[in-house]
């Protein structure tokens, strides 16, 4: 759910998960209204199977690869190649957004599928196990929510303990940033389409625009825009009880 509190300085403080943000701003902005009321979308067989597929990926990696814990000295040296075990890195993205005479602080928490640095390039990979992989065949880019998710991870601080202590969070020095969205078959776990892109100025602008709009909608200053797509509504887990559906 999306939580809104008041900071000690009287400014708004918004906390949400990366998934909730990217799903709202990349798929349907009206999800914010449900999340503000604390309504969680019901689990479906598709989401359950997706979770199981991710768990199998973690187990496969544990069985076939041995990861030595990455030291703080290795992290600090951007010339060192490093790789963290799958789903072992938690993310913390915080930003301040000015509007009027106020400044809203936003904190988005998540957990990345894969984080590594190779030849000075910070790489974040997110793995997806869709019900239908064929729809990705003709796409030149992944869906907006998938891009938003990886961009947030790329710009986050990281931790391997999910601690609330700021001292346990760290940055990963780098020269470039690359996001990867890996579409896999949930039966074979083989990749059927891999999207890859560098973080560009255009991508930063895209992310910042979505962050600002998310804050304004959450605070009730701006209304969500409807996507006007019946197929999106019918595929949404809120569909059965959503007063905004088509």
Image: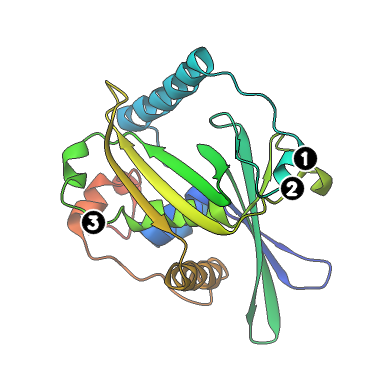
Bin the neighbour count of mark 3 within 10 Å (Cα to Cα): few under 14, some 14-19, many 20 and up. few
Q: Which mark is residue 76?
A: 2
Q: Disc number at residue 72? A: 1
Residue 24 on image: x %, y % = 42, 57
Q: Residue at horizontal 23%, vertical 56%?
A: 140
Residue contact at pointers 1 and 3, CB within 8 angstroms: no
Q: Nearer the viewer, residue 124 or 210?
A: 124
Q: CA distance from mark 3 to mark 2?
A: 35 Å
Res. 201 visible in picture: yes
Q: Name the N-terminal-most of marks 1 and 3.
A: 1
Residue position marked by numbered label 3 in the rendering: 140
Sequence-first tag of 3 and 2: 2
In space, the residues marked 1 and 2 are separated at their CA atoms by 6 Å
Specify few, some or many for label 1: CA neighbours under 10 Å numbering under 14, 14-19, or 20 or more. Answer: few
SS at mark 1 in the image: helix
Callout 2: few (<14), some (14-19), or many (20+) C-alpha neighbours within 10 Å? Answer: some
Of 65 and 161, which appears nearest the observer?
Answer: 65
- Among the 4 quarters of the image, the one containing residue 3: bottom right
Can residue 30 be spotted in the picture? Answer: no
């Amino acid at each position: 759910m999306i939580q809104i509190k008041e900071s000690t300085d009287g400014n708004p403080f918004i906390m949400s998960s990366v998934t909730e943000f990217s799903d709202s701003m990349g798929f349907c902005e009206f999800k914010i209204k449900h999340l503000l009321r604390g309504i969680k979308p019901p689990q479906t067989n598709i989401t359950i199977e997706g979770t199981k597929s991710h768990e199998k990926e973690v187990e496969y990696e544990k069985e076939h690869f041995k990861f030595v814990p990455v030291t703080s000295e290795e992290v600090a040296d951007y010339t060192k190649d490093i790789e963290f075990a799958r789903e072992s890195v938690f993310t913390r993205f915080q930003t301040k957004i000015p509007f009027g005479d106020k400044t809203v602080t936003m904190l988005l928490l998540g957990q990345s599928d894969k984080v590594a640095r190779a030849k000075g390039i910070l790489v974040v990979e997110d793995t997806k196990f869709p019900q239908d992989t064929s729809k990705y065949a003709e796409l030149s880019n992944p869906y907006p929510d998938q891009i938003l998710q990886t961009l947030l991870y790329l710009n986050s601080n990281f931790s391997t303990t999910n601690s609330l202590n700021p001292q346990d969070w760290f940055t990963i020095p780098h020269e470039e940033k690359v996001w990867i969205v890996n579409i896999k078959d949930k039966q074979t776990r083989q990749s059927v389409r891999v999207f890859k892109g560098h973080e560009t100025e255009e991508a930063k602008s895209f992310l910042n625009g979505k962050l600002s709009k998310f804050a304004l909608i959450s605070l009730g200053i701006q209304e969500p825009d409807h996507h006007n797509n019946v197929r999106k509504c019918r595929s949404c887990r809120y569909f059965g009880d959503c007063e905004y559906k088509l």
